[in-house]
Amino acid sequence: MSYSASNQDDDIRRAAQTLLSARYVMALTGAGISVESGIPPFRGPGGLWTKYGEPPMNGYQIFLQNPKKAWEERLNPQGPSKIIWETVGSAEPNAGHHAFAELEKMGILQCLITQNVDNLHKRAGSQKLVEIHGNYTLIRCIECNSRYPGSEVPLHNLPPQCPKCNGMLKSDTVSFGEPIPPDALDACYSETQLCDCFIVAGTSATVYPAASFPLAVRQKGGTLIEINLYESEITPLCQFSLRGPSAEVMPKLIAAIKELRQ
Ligand SMILES: [Zn+2]
């Protein structure tokens, strides 16, 4: 179904009204919002993994078998992971990232879950943020889940050790085969219990466990608002499907909320 501009303006106004009357608003973002900042997707034509090689499906087990080697590969200046993270690091937050941060400052958005590891939500100012697949700028202890900025961790002895518990340190980005860090998962579950309105932006919400959070809210009668360029698997469950890039739709939504609040 194609939307005329006036139809979408009407939808945006009604979605804004729904956000204003909701008790506890959450959001989930995925690769779409990163692509809008110029970060190539991982898969598909031009994708980072398509170009530099797909990480192994048992990456976490390989890490555990030989963490020193895994660290050396990560730090290799000519290695694919260095190139990939430099590409990611050169991106800037876009209007969509800034709008999510503003929605939080306005007291409306209570928790933002992102599947993205690119640090752009944090750079845009989001604070109530759960980075469910980690953050590429951070290093995490696999024992106690403490996280440290990459620049602060001495790397002369590999693998580096946690200053708090001597546990092994790994990049915070969740590898294939690695469980979602329990603290991140627990936060998602407890926040979702409070939530009655969920924005799903730039993701088809098919990757578990992230997908289960909006679905749980829908099942208990909450409202789902989708922001995506295309229809996706979650579209039939959404009360509002706002077609377009987050960097365009989110600022319109914020403007509509401000207008209603006047
Ligand atoms: Zn530790």
Image: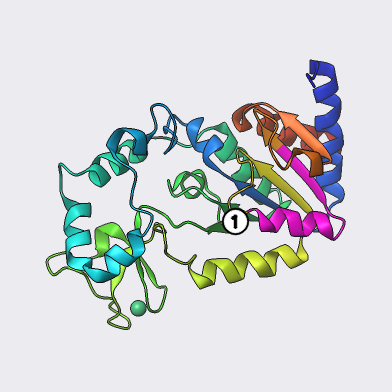
Closer to the camera in the image, 34 or 261: 34
- Residue 200: where, in percent of width, then height? 68, 44
Left or right, residue 125 beside residue 22? left
Tell me the residue at 31%/43% (across/down): 85
Closer to the camera in the image, 205 or 195: 205
Tell me the residue at 56%/43% (across/down): 30
Left or right, residue 78 beside residue 100? left
- Residue 46: where, in percent of width, then height? 38, 27
- Location of residue 213 by image quarter: bottom right
- Residue 253: where, in percent of width, then height? 74, 34
Whether residue 193 is visible to the viewer of this picture, yes or no, is yes
- Residue 164: where, in percent of width, then height? 32, 81
Instruction: Assess disc 1: are there few (<14), some (14-19) or many (≥20) residues with their C-alpha within 10 Å of its C-alpha.
Output: few
Closer to the camera in the image, 59 or 134: 59
Q: Is residue 123 above or below residue 166?
A: above
- Location of residue 241 by image quarter: top right
Q: Which residues are magenta?
A: 211-226
Tell me the residue at 78%/46% (across/down): 224
Tell me the residue at 84%/54% (across/down): 222
